[in-house]
Image (tube, rainbow, N blue to C red):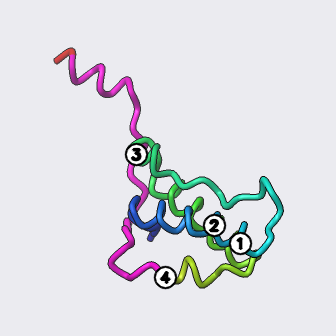
């Protein structure tokens, strides 16, 4: 099973992690992994899950695990399997029909 936050929750956490890291004197330029919210439809479930796992690891390593823990259980999406990634050529094929 794959799991990651819904885009709006992920973005909120990402922004909060950046602010909190700066507030505690975190090194400039060191930011959490970028969420896949802009590439949501182009990313597979496993890619989203893996990036989220990187974010959780980053937050934990920087003493900010409480931020990722603030997402309510309803703020996540889960997938039983990994859907096929979106391919632009599929859209082209559908338009031709």
Residue marked by disc 2: 19
Which quadrant would residue 18 be assigned to in this image?
bottom right
Residue toward you, 91 or 68: 68
Residue 51: x, y in percent? 59, 59
**Residue plotted at (37% across, 68% down):** 77
Which marked residue is nearer to the observer: mark 3 or mark 2?
Answer: 2
Residue 50: x, y in percent? 58, 61
Residue toward you, 48 or 55: 55
Q: Secondary structure at mark 3?
A: loop
Residue marked by disc 4: 70
User: Is 42 above or below relative to 10?
Assistant: above
User: Is 61 above or below relative to 41?
Assistant: below
Residue 54: x, y in percent? 65, 65
Q: Are marks 1 and 2 in contact (CB under 8 Å)?
A: yes
Q: Residues within 10 Å of mark 3 (few under 14, many from 20)?
A: few
Q: Which is more N-terminal, label 2 or label 4?
A: 2
**Residue plotted at (59% across, 84% down):** 66
Between the residue at mark 1 and the residue at mark 2, the CA separation in whole angstroms equals 6 Å
Which marked residue is nearer to the observer: mark 4 or mark 1?
Answer: 1
Between the residue at mark 3 and the residue at mark 4, the CA separation in whole angstroms equals 30 Å
Q: Residues within 10 Å of mark 1 (few under 14, many from 20)?
A: few
Asked if residue 7 lies left or right of residue 15, the reply is left
Which marked residue is nearer to the observer: mark 3 or mark 1?
Answer: 1
Q: Are marks 3 and 2 in contact (CB under 8 Å)?
A: no
Q: Which is more N-terminal, label 1 or label 4?
A: 1
> What span is in magenta?
70-95
Residue marked by disc 3: 84
């Amino acid at each position: 099973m794959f799991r990651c936050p819904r885009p709006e929750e992920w973005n909120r956490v990402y922004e909060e992690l950046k602010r909190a890291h700066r507030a505690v004197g975190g090194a400039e330029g060191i930011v959490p992994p970028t969420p896949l919210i802009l590439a949501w439809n182009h990313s597979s479930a496993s890619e989203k899950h893996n990036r989220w796992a990187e974010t959780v690891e980053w937050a934990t390593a920087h003493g900010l695990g409480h931020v990722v823990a603030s997402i309510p259980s309803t703020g996540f999406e889960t997938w039983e399997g990994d859907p096929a990634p979106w391919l632009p050529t599929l859209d082209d094929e559908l338009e031709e029909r």
